[in-house]
Image (cartoon, coloured by chain):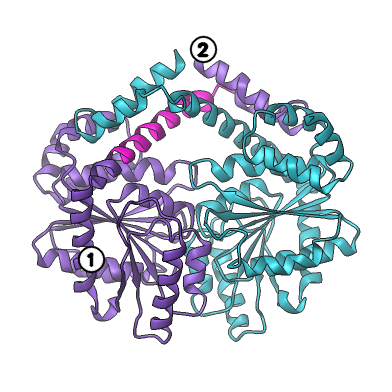
Chain colours: A purple, B cyan
Amino acid sequence: MTEETIERALAGHARALARLVSLVEDGAPELRAIMKALAPLTGGARVIGLTGAPGVGKSTMTAALVRAYRERDQRVGVLAVDPTSPFTGGALLGDRVRMQDHATDPGVFIRSMASRGHLGGLAAATPQALRVLDAAGFGVVLVETVGVGQAEVEVASLADTTLVLVAPGAGDAVQAAKAGILEVGDIFVVNKCDSPGAQETVRNLRTMIAMAARGAGDWKPPIVMTTATAGEGITDLTAAIDAHGSWLNSSGERDRRRRARAREEVAAIAVATLRQRMGGLPGDSRLDELADRVAAGELDPYSAADELVATASA
Amino acid sequence: MTEETIERALAGHARALARLVSLVEDGAPELRAIMKALAPLTGGARVIGLTGAPGVGKSTMTAALVRAYRERDQRVGVLAVDPTSPFTGGALLGDRVRMQDHATDPGVFIRSMASRGHLGGLAAATPQALRVLDAAGFGVVLVETVGVGQAEVEVASLADTTLVLVAPGAGDAVQAAKAGILEVGDIFVVNKCDSPGAQETVRNLRTMIAMAARGAGDWKPPIVMTTATAGEGITDLTAAIDAHGSWLNSSGERDRRRRARAREEVAAIAVATLRQRMGGLPGDSRLDELADRVAAGELDPYSAADELVATASA
């Protein structure tokens, strides 16, 4: 059953692929068998992260990039990581409607991942979904995250190339700096360049990027101006992504990033496994007992954690 | 040395308190001894979380609330959780300047926590800093988070009462819904009510709150209109916080939240301990080896994690 689903997904059947991603996202019992089967097929996809504050036009940009890579005959996967919301997938997500252009194109696979809201939600499910698309032969996978902060740092660790989107406006570049995303961007995109203030935002960004302490070697992140709704600047953007790709290869940074990614992935799964072991079983109320004593001030949380670890490792 | 620092901090010396928080934030070796000493003194503080997208005026609101609680003769602690940035504490954080009103007031302690950018950064350091302020007798602790998404869910699990700030504007209430923060708010605050569109934002919010699936019993989250820069609506807001506090007590929800908080805290520390054990030692390259095999496609991440867990538990 699972084997058949895997075979059909690899052969390009959209429904089998969707089912495989669901199994992975849900942490189904078949997950381990699936991952074992796919491992030798991974490593071919270029992973592009796309991040920025709400309202900067990430979904429109994603749609524009899908179009651009389809014109190059690349198969494109999209993983949109949305926070949990009763509205996810509903009428509020009007942005998603724009993606319907690609709904009938078998060379495009779009998946809205629910960010689980618990520690390790995004960190656990997204890399595995990425592996599925990678193994299924998608040459480009776009990972789009909503939100500012922790999620951006995580998407940067998943991607070969991370795009940070900023909209023109007095405070926007400053907000990006405050949110700590200057450090994670490989390419900066000032989108909505038909709005006033775009040039000033580019200038501000340039100053702040120069000031930000960066650890990514000799790559100087370019700033690309776009208006995704009109398709303007997209050619410049894909050229910048290509240039970053060449640098990743020649500098050995791609290999370094992929090993770091695997490291995070393995550690996150191991932690989730241990965590489950500590408090997951319905009859196991050890954590509850210890927590109640902490809440009552009878015990400090570190002593409680030590007792818990001793139990879990036993 | 540590004992003396603890004693002085509990006696109200700001410098000793700052040092204690630093030790806790850095995960210093003294951490466990400090937590053990403080445990019996905790449980008195009312913890108020304050969250919302960048630019809605969180810092100004925090300053206004500090003023309001000082007028009631409450000692107030503030933990501002900012993402890592080379600018943290620097000139870009003009917002912080407004807090200088309180810089010489010994009844106010303000701390900008760096969100570490790694899994469990915020989750590990902030609850411990909160414990220090709680034990030191701060009646109110405000926890302010920058960003949208995961951090908001975490702050909600730390706080007795969570305030969600929204600014007027066509898309803002919708953005709040998309970010998944409708579910975590105990009180909604439409700030900057001197801007156009405030009434419409209140209406939109009301509709969406009614639609959101909530699990917090019979509490109906009110919407308070404020203009924090002018001090308007702050009395209404503190009244709403008081009303929520009464409900927390009468419904037993305060106790339930505190036990859940302790549970998360203990589990997070246990996980961090195990994680450190798995790959923390400089000479221990087990995780690196496994990760390299995953990156090369020789091994899937789940099999790698299983091998790692077997090592860590041995």
Residue segment shown in magenta: A259-284
The kind of secondary structure element at disc 2 is loop
Residue drawn where x is 57% and y is 60% of the image: B146
Indicate whether A5 appears above or below B148: above
Give B9 or B78, whichever is nearer the viewer.
B9
Residue drawn where x is 67% and y is 84% of the image: B194
Callout 2: residue from which chain? A
Cα distance in 3D space between marks 1 and 2: 52 Å
Q: Which mark is residue A240?
A: 1
Residue A42, position in %: x, y? 18, 40
Give A227 or A7, whichever is nearer the viewer.
A227
Q: Report which residue position mark 2 lands on.
A: A314
Residue type (three-letter) at the residue carrying disc 2: Ala
Residue B112 seen from this side: yes
Residue A5, position in %: x, y? 16, 38
Residue A97 seen from this side: no
Residue drawn where x is 35% and y is 79% of the image: A192
Residue A56, position in %: x, y? 40, 72
How many numbered discs, if any? 2
